[in-house]
Image: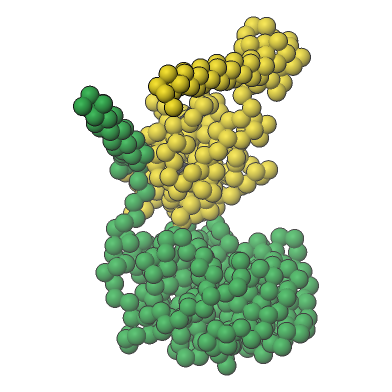
Amino acid sequence: MDVNEKQTSRREVLRLVGRVGVLGCLASLAGMLTGRLRGGCIEAGPACKGCPDQDGCDLVTPPTVWQLDPAKCTNCGQCATDCVLAQSAVRCFHTHALCGHCKLCFGYFEPGARVLSSAAENQLCPTGAIQRRFVEDPYYAYTIEKDLCIGCSKCVHGCSMFGNGSLYLQVDHELCKNCNECSIARRCPANAFERVPVSEAYLLKGQGEEEGN
Amino acid sequence: MKTRGIWIVLALVAVGVVILLSWRRGGPRVPRTYRYDVDEYLEAEKQVPLPYKESARWPLALREPRAVAVKGDGRVVVVGDRVALVLDDAGEELRRIELSDEPRCVAVADVVYVGLLDRIVVYGLDGEKQAEWESLGEQAYLTGLAILDGDIFASDYGQRVVWRFDAEGKMRGRIRSASKTDGFVFPSPTFDVAADGDGLWVINSGRRRVEQYSPEGKRGTMWGRSSMELDGFSGCCNPTHIVVMPDGRFVTTEKGLPRVKVYAADGTFAALVAGSEQLGQDAGLLDVAVDAAGRILVLDAADRSVRVFEKSVSL
Ligand code: SF4
Ligand code: SF4
Ligand code: SF4
């Protein structure tokens, strides 16, 4: 093979690669546009108001949202530290129907608390987000002040270890930015995060019984 | 030479990126105040001598083992899924009895009494079904069975009573909460019953104690205290199970900090049989039985096995 022939064939190969590249780019651009142009729209905006195709439109409503599976969570505490928000979008939820309404609640008191009073030194929640209310002897009701909760999972750990597991963490959609890549999910050691359809936006314990805070 | 330099720079950048990524993988340090810390109690357990040692472990072909009981001749009955397994005293399966529903508890004498959610079913040790007693109602949730002088006592978490039946299944009475202000409290289905010559021993787990009752339902002595220390019962609802040993001492099991312990006949703490280190932090509910030789048989549902503990030093 002479040198000229070698050079020609290298040039042809390069040209071929270039063409394939350009074609590839054009194809993906076309794909993106056809995907985005459903109903003739490119992005959500004022025109969406009153649009009959709004329900289920990818531009208006993202098809999935982030949730964590409480059964997988190992209470590592990173939900409090890893969210992109200064105060995590993960909060403590409480299924009252599962709660034992214990006087000695291991989600409320520090393990080994000597006095079962609401004094700050007896409470395990670092932000005092759990409210304790006397119901009738020996039962108490517990509610979570969502604004104060930072999703640290300390109460969840105590409740699942010693109690009925009625306290658990969950992503609160009123706060969550629904990041494409959830920064907690990326580092969750239990792989507890998953995307769920918007139509079933919450993975709650004892679903159908009672939920909320 | 120039290419070599570029490669070195690229390699250094790659190493840097890997280090940075792996450091971030561990996540930012979680402040200590966010940690649920029971280390002090786990550490204390480790300092305690263990006079029992695990001498055998019998794996069970069950997805969800629920309860264990021992007959006087050493045969062991384990229930779970929808079967009752009859084992010999070395854990070999002798018989597999199919059940109509999921079992919750079991007791054995000349026959096997299996507690389903709302009723008791009686089987011969040959596997023959002998009787199915009436349902105790929609609220029933049976959690424990004991036999005393031929009568069968069934603790019912759903209705907070201990039912008393004769051997034919005729109801003879019920033991209710002894007092409105100091009665039964069960935040979770941890309501077991055992029997010996002194009567019935009923777990009042929400009050972290064991209460003695006459067969007619009169409350007698009580023992047990609420504490994270080894001699007490921790959590919202402990102990979870109880059995009386041939010499009158008690064996109890606990959840949360999984523990199997021996208490003297007067309720004073005698020994730790196994703690979190031996049982694992996720042990769940542990039923327990004691055979005539004093071996402690712990049903480890998480491990799907019966774990046999024998005394290695005298107490
Ligand atoms: S990061 Fe994962 S394991 Fe840790 S608290 Fe959040 S959900 Fe649980
Ligand atoms: S202990 Fe942590 S997770 Fe629980 S309520 Fe307080 S801040 Fe929220
Ligand atoms: S998706 Fe974003 S905002 Fe929502 S929990 Fe994850 S990191 Fe926080």
Question: Which chain is in yellow here?
Answer: A
- Which of the 4 quarters of the picture holds residue A52? top right
- Which of the 4 quarters of the picture holds residue B108? bottom right
In the displayed structure image, the side of residue B269 where residue A202 appears, left or right: right
Q: Is residue A13 above or below residue A128?
A: above
Which residue is at the far front? Answer: A2
Which residue is at the far top? Answer: A46
Residue B184 in the image: state x and y as whole percent: 56, 63
Residue B280 in the image: state x and y as whole percent: 42, 64
Colour representing chain B: green
* Residue B263 can be seen in this image: no
Q: Is residue B257 above or below residue B309?
A: above
On-image quarter of the C terminus of chain A: top right
Residue B26 in the image: state x and y as whole percent: 35, 41
In the displayed structure image, the side of residue B283 where residue B200 appears, left or right: right
Query: What residue appears at the point 32 percent right and 87 percent down from the top-left corner?
Result: B314
Q: How is the image coloured?
A: by chain
Q: Nearer the viewer, residue B109 or B139?
A: B109
In the displayed structure image, the side of residue A143 where residue A210 appears, left or right: right
- Please count the marks in the image: 0
* Residue B251 can be seen in this image: yes
Query: What residue appears at the point 43 percent right and 72 percent down from the top-left corner?
Result: B260
Q: Nearer the viewer, residue B160 or A90?
A: A90
On-image quarter of the N terminus of chain A: top left
Q: Is residue B109 above or below residue B221?
A: below
Q: Nearer the viewer, residue A180 or B97?
A: A180
Query: What residue appears at the point 48 percent right and 22 percent down from the top-left corner?
Result: A9
Residue B67 in the image: state x and y as whole percent: 59, 73
Query: What residue appears at the point 55 percent right and 64 percent down from the top-left corner?
Result: B190
In the displayed structure image, the side of residue B149 where residue A149 appears, left or right: left
